[in-house]
Image (tube, rainbow, N blue to C red):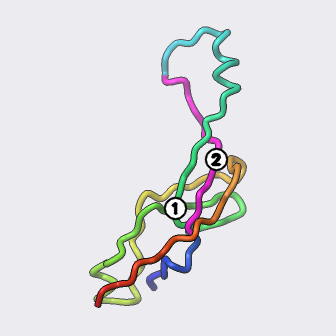
Amino acid sequence: MAHDMSKIPFVEVEWDDAQDHGGAWVEFSKIQEFADIPCRIVSRGWLVHKGKRYVVLSSDYIADDIELRKNPNADRILSRVTKIPRAWLVSIREIKIATRRRRR
């Protein structure tokens, strides 16, 4: 069955990501400086899953899906789905968004 995206919270998530040094050779003395700088990421999307170990965001969905018009029991199609380990989360903040009315 299609999920009503207006009932799913839209959020901004701050989280610390894993990071490599870009594959280049690095002087040992530079590694500590690199290690101490967090790779802080900000992601926005619909909070489609909030589990014990992960949260999952989707940044896009098909609003006027032909399949949903033909079959209201079809599943919604989402894109740019990101799974973030809860241990990496810094904050989750809900953002209220205005929903557009569908033309009939």
What range of the chain is rendered magenta? 10-22
Secondary structure under the numbered disc 1 in the rendered image: strand
> How far apart are labels 1 and 2 at the CA level?
14 Å
Where is the N terminus found, in terms of image quarters? bottom left
Where is the C terminus found, in terms of image quarters? bottom left
Mark 1 sits on what residue? 45
Instruction: Decide: few, some or many residues near mark 2? Use Cα within 10 Å; few <14, some 14-19, many ≥20.
Output: many
Instruction: Decide: few, some or many residues near mark 1? Use Cα within 10 Å; few <14, some 14-19, many ≥20.
Output: many
Q: Quadrant of residue 35?
A: top right
Residue 44 versus residue 76 in the image, above or below: above
Expressed as whole percent of the image width and height from the top left, the position of residue 70 reads 28, 89
Relative to 22, 70 lies left or right: left
The amino acid type found where label 1 is placed reads Gly
Residue visible at 55% across and 67% down in the picture: 10
Residue 57 versus residue 20 in the image, above or below: below
The amino acid type found where label 2 is placed reads Trp
Relative to 95, 65 lies left or right: left
Mark 2 sits on what residue? 15
Residue visible at 67% across and 65% down in the picture: 51
